[in-house]
Image (tube, rainbow, N blue to C red):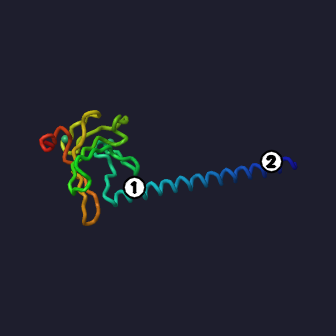
Amino acid sequence: MEYVLLGGSLFVLVLLLNFFINYKAYGKQEKEWKRRRQKREEAAAKGLLVNCPLCNSPLYPGEDLFTRVYRPMSVSDQLCIIKGCPHCYPRVEEGLKRECPVCHKQIDGKTGHLVAHLFNKTSDGKKHVVIAGCNLCCKSKLN
Ligand SMILES: [Zn+2]
Ligand SMILES: [Zn+2]
């Protein structure tokens, strides 16, 4: 009888411990979600792109687009090309499509890119990106 009682209390103890560990893990995960959400909201508030303009994947801070800026950073209107994000460049993830938001043509993973203007707004300090098109529909504007 004593053994049964001991076993029972041990069982309860294990259950409690399990619950405690799970609870802690859940709290950690929730914290991580909150942190990511907050970071994303901060990025959105700064006027940064939060979705890849090519494949439309949501981008978290740290997942930067592959871009090349042509003119010096000091000018207010910079020309840049966007090669893609970590999800679609250099390799396109399964289920994703690289499409030009202007002409809706498929953009090649290796040679294709988007042409964009990066405006450094001085009045409120926000950066503003305007997609002009892809290398196919924007050729005339580049030269
Ligand atoms: Zn992308
Ligand atoms: Zn295009």
Instruction: Decide: is 85 above or below 30.
Output: above
Which residue sits at x=19%, y=44%? 133
Spot occupied by residue 65 in the image (x, y as percentages of width and height): 33, 45
- Image x and y of residue 135, in percent: 19, 39
The residue beneath circle 1 is 40
Residue most extreme to the bottom:
123
The Cα–Cα distance between marks 2 and 1, rounded to whole angstroms, is 49 Å
Residue 24 sits above or below residue 84 on the image:
below
Q: Nearer the viewer, residue 63 or 19?
A: 63
| Earlier sequence position, callout 2 versus callout 1 | 2
Q: In this view, which residue lies farthest toward the right?
A: 1
Q: Nearer the viewer, residue 54 or 64?
A: 64
Q: Quadrant of ligand 1?
A: top left
- Number of numbered discs present? 2
Q: Residues within 10 Å of mark 2 (few under 14, many from 20)?
A: few
**Crowd rating for badge 1 (residues with CA inside 10 Å; few <14, some 14–19, many 20+):** some
34 lies above or below 87: below
Residue drawn 36% across and 47% down?
64
| Secondary-structure class at tag 1 | helix
Please, what secondary structure does the residue beneath circle 2 have? helix
Q: Which residue is mark 2?
A: 7
Q: Nearer the viewer, residue 38 or 139?
A: 139
* Amino acid of disc 1: Arg
